[in-house]
Amino acid sequence: MTIAREVSTQADWYVCSNCRTTIYAKRFARELRVCQDCGWHSRLSAAQRIAQLFDHGAEELGVPGTTVDPLSFVDVRAYAERHASARADTGMERGVVVVRGSIDGRPLVAAVMDFRFLGGSLGAAEGEAITVAAEAALAERLPLLVVTASGGARMQEGALSLMQMAKTSNAFAALDEAGLLTITLVTDPTYGGVAASFATLSDVVVAEPGARMGFAGPRVIEQTIRQRLPEGFQTAEYLLAKGLVDLVRPRSELRATLSRLLAVTDRAPARWCADLPDVRLGSADLAAASGWDTVKLARHIDRPTGLDHVAHLLDGFVELHGDRLGADCPALVGGFGVLDGLPVLALCHQKGHNTAELVARNFGMPSPAGYRKSARLLRLAAKLGTPVVALIDTPGAFPGIEAEENGQAVAIAENLRLMGGLGVPVVSVITGEGGSGGALALAVADTVLITQNGTYSVISPEGCASILWRDAAAAPLAAASLGIDPVSLLRAGVVDAVVPEPDGGSHLDPAAASELLRQAVARSLAELVGRESAELVAARRLRFRRLGLGGGEVA
């Protein structure tokens, strides 16, 4: 059957449940049932949600019948009566609707929960519906979207309800193994067994503003620990800051956001960028430059940042947040976008153009959470078969007490190993400073480029001077001795080519600098796209295996 557009039969006026503002009902419907005074997002039925998100013509998929009232459960009312009332009140057989449809022409399968049906609780019928949706996505090799709204497991079905957590998690595992994109849209509320299974197993977790999600509800937590909870605890914004969701998007932006995420699954055009001119330079094309002068240009405050470059390189970039372990690092940014028709994962260090931006981004020095976020997204790129572009500009990984306590060395090591074995094309570019292991963590690539005024070093010149010369003022001498400039790095074989910059440096013409970078990256990727995974990994590992044996620059 086809999902019908819901016709409103409500009164002329609506009172916001949050701020108590009286809203004209037709305007409230036009605003997607969001209060324009306070931003409160009202709950939607499954039919309303599908109508808002999908292109017209979404088709409902059938779900096999399941056991009802397996325990003959009775509390103050018989469960069979409760269930029958829910069916009558909502016109639904269960609390989940499964549909096949499209968003901006991109096909997908979705399972949409409806809180009106027994509080969106997870019973056998709901678990079956989620699993059917996953199996349909698997059979048709389509992305899967789940829209969650639940108070948790359904107590009246006992252990059978609990088993739906494992059942749905297994279905999501099969989608992972098949390399299919999964997305969760968290709506208010999402708790208990739903949060602790399929809701948080998706590749990308998007949340509506103010949506609450957690394993235990706030009342249970407060009663257990006898403490007052922090302001905003378990809300989407709180979870975003803790690195537990990727995005928080208002309802008006959800459709466009989902469309951009689905674009990651688009296929690259045939002969992608094959005719693009090659702007990359070798050592013969470059004049020798002072190492210290290069350092100063690499650090220039007006030099394009990673996000400046990403804005020029990629269409439809969607930044994804969090390491899923309790933190998000603003110094390391990652997300998906489209480079001249080719979906890619972009990773970049991010500094800033003024003191406030630099402080907010920790001067481009990632914490362990940054490298764990990178690892999470690299695994996702490998799952989806998406090439990786890494833009590197960092003094190094953050050397603080908390970073050490949280495993900075382990997080960097994991990225090194992961990138070395990644079965998709990887191009890394040092766009400014390439500081030590903090830079190398994103540079185990098939092709390693450096911009004309970039640097790449085992240590900063100041650090080297302080240790070996015992005088930080000897930094210019250390810079010359370390061979951190592009010509020296080319001759050593550490980088493969140089991306030219506008005369005087990228800071003088950031747009031109980003365009040169785009052409160099696209040309490098064009040489890699289409190669078998095993071939890419073998060649990448051989590239690094040879370093230090005296081979130098590849002609």
Image: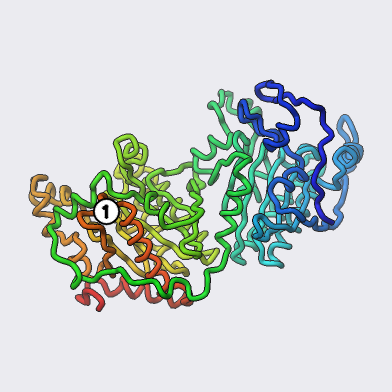
Q: For the point 66% across and 40% down, which residue is it?
A: 187
Q: Is residue 223 above or below residue 80?
A: above
Amino acid at pointer 1: Ser
Residue 337: x and y in percent read 49, 57
Report the side of 52 relative to 343 (left or right).
right
Which quadrant would residue 281 be assigned to in this image?
bottom left
Which quadrant would residue 121 be assigned to in this image?
top right
Residue 486: x and y in percent read 21, 63
Report the side of 8 relative to 88 (left or right).
left
Q: Is residue 116 above or below residue 263?
A: above
Would you say residue 73 is visible in this rendering? Answer: no
- In this rendered view, identify the residue nearer to me: 350 or 339: 339
Report the side of 236 relative to 464 (left or right).
right
Q: For the point 66% across and 66% down, which residue is it?
A: 141
Q: Which residue is mark 1?
A: 506
Q: For the point 40% across and 76% down, which residue is it?
A: 538
Report the side of 62 relative to 150 (left or right).
right
Would you say residue 390 is visible in this rendering? Answer: yes
Task: Point out the image quarter for the C terminus.
Answer: bottom left
Q: For the point 57% across and 51% down, which residue is it?
A: 204
Which quadrant would residue 495 be assigned to in this image?
bottom left
Q: Is residue 94 above or below residue 415?
A: above
Residue 465: x and y in percent read 12, 50
Residue 167: x and y in percent read 72, 55
Task: Point out the image quarter for the N terminus.
Answer: bottom right
